[in-house]
Amino acid sequence: MLSYFFRRLMAGIPTLLISFTLVFFIAHATPGSPWDTSSNRPLEAAVKARLDAKYHLDDPLYVQYIDYLAGALQGDFGPSFRDRTKSVTDIVAQFLPVSMKLGSAAMLLAVVLGLPLGALAALSRHRVIDGVVRLISTLGISMPSYVVTSILIVAFGVGLGWVPTFGWKGVFSASSLVPIFSLALAPLAAIIRCFRTSMLEVMNLDFIRTARAKGLRPATVIIHHMGRNALIPAITVIGAYTSYVLVGSFFVESIAGIPGFGRYFVLAVAARDYPVIIGTTLIYALFVIVINLIVDLSYFLLDPRVRAEHGR
Amino acid sequence: MSAADADYRSANGIAARIRDVGPWIAQNPGLVGGVLFLTFVILLAILAPLLPHDAYRQNVLHRNELPSLEHWLGTDELGRDLLARIAVGARVSLVVAVASTIIAVAIGVMIGTIAAYLGGLVDSTIMRFVDSMYAFPETLFAILMAALVKGQLSGDGHGLLAPLVEAYRLSGGLLGVLLTLGLTGWLTTSRLVRAHVLSLKHAEYVLSCKLSGATHWFIIRTHLLPNTIPIILVAVTFVVPNAILLEAGLSFIGIGVDPPTPSWGTMIATGAQSIQSYPHLLICPALAIGLTLLSLTVIGDTLRDMFDPALAGTRRA
Amino acid sequence: MALGRKAPGVRREQGGASQSEPLLQVRGLHVRFGNGVRAVDGIDFDVAPGETLAIVGESGCGKTTLGRAVTLLLRPTEGQVVFDGIDLTKLGQRKLRTARRDLQMIFQDPYASLDPRQRVGEIVGEPLRIAGMEAAARRKRVAKLLDMVGLGGDMAGRLPREFSGGQRQRIGIARALAADPRLVICDEPLSSLDVSIQAQIVNLLVKLQAELLLTYVFISHDFAVVRQIATRVAVMYLGRIVELAETERLFRAPGHPYTVSLLSAVPTLSCSKISDDQPQLLAGDPPSPARVPTGCRFHTRCWLRRQLGDPSICTSEDPALSGDGQQKTACHFSAELLAGNSEHRRLDVGTNG
C-alpha cells in the first residue's frame, strides 16, 4: 500500500516540472518588463539595463530556466520583482495563510452543509424538499463568485450594515462572513448535486433492499451502507474544489478587500513579477497534487475494491 | 401503409408529439424557463442595434441615473444607456461562448481521439500533459494565457502576428479572450472523448471494419466520431457556461475585452465600486449573467441526464 | 483504397494456395499478455479449403484470443499465420490490409457487432465501400446478400435496433460475406441466441458454405452443434490444442482425457442418473493462464493420471501433439486411453440419447 502512494507521489514530480516549465515560458513570453512600474513614467534604458543584468533577465532564456529551476529545487524562488525587498517565500508566508484560513472555513461549511442536504434531497419523499434543494444548488453552481460576493455585500454590508464592506480582521470576525459564504457556495452546490445523485443511484441497488429486508435500523442503512458508497464520487468533487478554494479566489478577495494569495497573484501578473507568478503557480500545483493524494487515500480507506487491487 | 405502420405513426407521429407537449412542460419547468430565458438573451443580443439608445454614446449630463422611462435600466458612470450596454454585453458573451467552444471542443476532440486511438506511448504522453494542465486552477491559467495573448496581440505585430493584431483591434479585444478560452477549455472535452473512444475502439464492428481493410482515418470518421457525438454534446454543455463565466471573470480583472467594448464582467467591476451609491449598476449586469448561467446550467443538466446520467451534478468533468 | 483485386462475387484463382494446399497454416502461435497471461501458448494447425474446423474448449481457454490472433486483429507474440500462401505476421499495416481481405469474421454478440448508428445497408455494404465499389453496384449486391441470409432485400434502410438477435446475426453474416471471403472465422456465433434460433443460423451457415465454397473456423463451446457441422475438431485447453481429430472419430473415440471429461459433462436427456462419482468429471476450476502447470498442463485435473497411479511423466514432460491425419493428441497415455475406450466413454452426445 505504501508503495502505491509513493509511486503516486513520485508521479506528481513530472507534473510539477511540466507546470513549472509551462508557467515559466508563458510568463516570459508575455511582453512587458517587470520594471515598468507605471505606464506614465517608463524607466530610462540605462536603469532598465542595470536591473535586467542584476536579475539575470538579459541571459538567454534557457539559462534563466535552469538557473531558476536549480534555485526552486532548493526552495529559493528569489526576490519578488515588484517589491524587491521581499522574497517570494516571504510573500507566500505572509499572504497564503489568510487564504488558507478562509478556504478551510469555506470548505468546512460546504461539506458540513452539503452532504446532509444532498442526502436529504435524495431520501426525501416530498418532491418539494427535493425541488428546493435542487433549486438552491443549481443557483449556487451557476452564480459566479464575484456576483455572489457583490450582491451579498450590497445586501448585508451596505443595506443592513451587519458586516463591514471591506477589509479583513481575521477569520473569526464579521468581516469574514461574506467571503466565507461566497467561497463556499460553489462547492456546496456541487457537493449537494453530486451526493444527491450518487445517493439516488445507491438507494435503488439490490443490496440496500437486502439490508432493509434484514431489518437493519434505517439510520444504519443510510449512514453505513448507502452513505459510504455514495460518498466515493462526492470525495472527488470535494477534492477538486478544495484545491481551488484553499489557495484563494481573487474575485472574492478583490471585492471584499482581503489581503490574500489570490489577489496577490493577479497583481503579480499585471506587474510581470515573474518569480511571484512562478512561485505561486508551483504552490497551486503542489496543493493539487497533495490533495489528490489525500483523495486517493480516502478511496483506499472507503472502497475495499481499491484496497484489494493495490494494497496488502 | 400497413396496420402496424399506422399504429406506429399514431403513437409516435407528429400529432401525438404535439399532444404530449402540455404535460411535458409542467414536468420540466426549469428546462422550459431556461430555454425561454436563453432565447430572450439571444434575441436581445441580435436585436441590440434596434434599441432606442446606443451603447457607446456617452452623455455626461445623464450619469448614473436610476431606471426611468427614458432609460429603462438607467445609465452608467459615463452616461451610457445601461440596457443597451447589457444587450451588447450579451452579444459579447454569446459570441465568445460559441466561438471559443467551437475552438475548445475541436481541439479536445482531436486530442482525445488521437490519444485514445493510437494508445500506447502517445496516449500516456498526452494524458500526462493533460493531467499537468488539470493541476492548474483553470482561472489561474486563463489569467496567465490572457496576459500573454493580450500582450502579444496589442503590441505592434510583426510578421505572422500582424493580421491577428489587426483582427484583435477590430474585435475590440474579443479575439484575445476567444483564443484564451479556446486554448484553455479543451481539457474537459479531451478527457470525455478519450474515455469514450477507448471503449469504442474494441467494439466488434470496428474489428470487422479493420478486417475489411479500412484505414485508421476511415474507422475514425465512419464509426468512432459519429458514435461520440452524444459525448461531444455533453462536453459542450460544460464548456459553454464555463466560457461565459471565464470571459466575464477576465474582463472583471481587466484582461478580457478592451474598453469601451461592454462586457458583463467589466460592468460588474465598475458597478462593484459604486455599490453604495448606485446599486443598479451592479445588479443589472450581475442578474444578467447570473440568470444566463442558470439557464445554461439547467439546460446542460437536462441534456446530460439524457445522454449520460453519471455526470449529473459536476461543474467540470 | 486499393483496387488490386477482382470484384467481389468472382471467385479468385490467384493467391499462393491451390486447392490441395491448406488455406490457413498456423505455426507456433503464442499470444502473451503483459500481466503474464499466456492466452495462446504454442498452437499449430492447418485448415484445408472447404472444410469446417471447430475449436472447442471451456471459457478462458483462449479460443477467442486465438480467433483474434489468427486474423491479426491482435498481434501474436510469436509464430506464423500463413493465409493463402502469405505469412500475415510479417506484413506491415498497409500490406496486411490487402492480404487480409479474403479473411472475415462473424462475432459472438449480435447486439455489439453492428454499429447502432448505421443502417443495415451501410453495414453490410461497408466492406464493399472500403474495397472501392461504387454506390449503385453496392446497393445491388447488398440486396442480394440480404436475400441470401434470409432477410428481405428491402430491409437495407432499417436500423439494427429494429431487429432481433437472430436477425442481427444474419446481418453480421451478410456483412462478413459481402466481399466474398474465402475463410470465415465464426467466433461463438450462436452463444447469444435462443436455441430455436441457433438451429436456423446453423442451417444458414451450412447452406452458405456449400453455395459460396467457404471455409470455416468455428469457435464454440457447444458440442452438439460442433458435431453437426464440423469436419475436424480441435480441443483447446489453457492455450494449447490437446486433441485434433476428425469429428466422428473425436466423438466416438476421444484420445485425450480432457476430451473425455468434456464429453461426459454434456447433459443429455437420457433417463439414467448422472452419478457423482463418475471418474471422468472434471474437478475444480481450471488453472489460471498466467500460471500454467508444469509438464502436461492438464495433469492437475486429469482423471486418467489418477487412474494410472500418478505417473511421473505427467508432471515432468509436456506432451506434444502427435498422431496421424485422422487424430492427433497431446497425451502421454493416449494409446492406453484409446485401448480402454469401451469402458470409459459416453457416446450419446449430439444424438438423441
Image (cartoon, coloured by chain):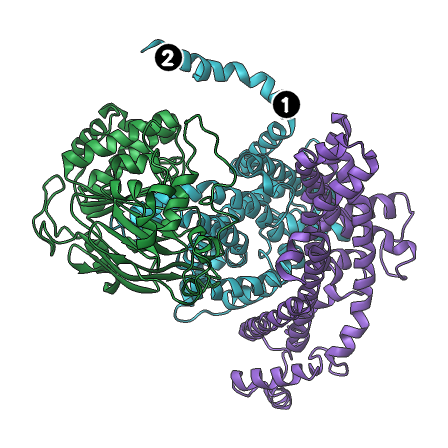
Q: Secondary structure at mark 2?
A: helix
Q: Is residue C151 above or below residue A240?
A: above
Looking at the rendering, which quadrant does residue C148 occupy? top left
Q: Is residue A258 above or below residue B218?
A: below
Q: Residue at x 32, y 46 (%)?
A: C254
Give the number of the mark in front: 2 or 1: 2
**x, y percent for residue A125:** 76, 26
Q: Secondary structure at mark 1?
A: helix
**Circle 2 marks a residue in which chain?**
B
Asked whether, in this view, residue A145 is left or right of residue B123, the answer is right
**Circle 1 marks a residue in which chain?**
B
Q: Residue at x 47, y 70 (%)?
A: B156
In the figure, what tint was chain A given? purple
Asked whether, in this view, residue C294 is left or right of residue C100, the answer is right
Q: Residue at x 61, y 58 (%)?
A: A309
Q: Earlier in the sequence, mark 2 or mark 1?
A: 2
**Residue C262 appearing in the image:** yes
In the figure, what tint was chain C given? green
| Residue C60 image label | none
**x, y percent for residue A239:** 70, 56
Q: Residue at x 55, y 18 (%)?
A: B21
| Residue B27 image label | 1
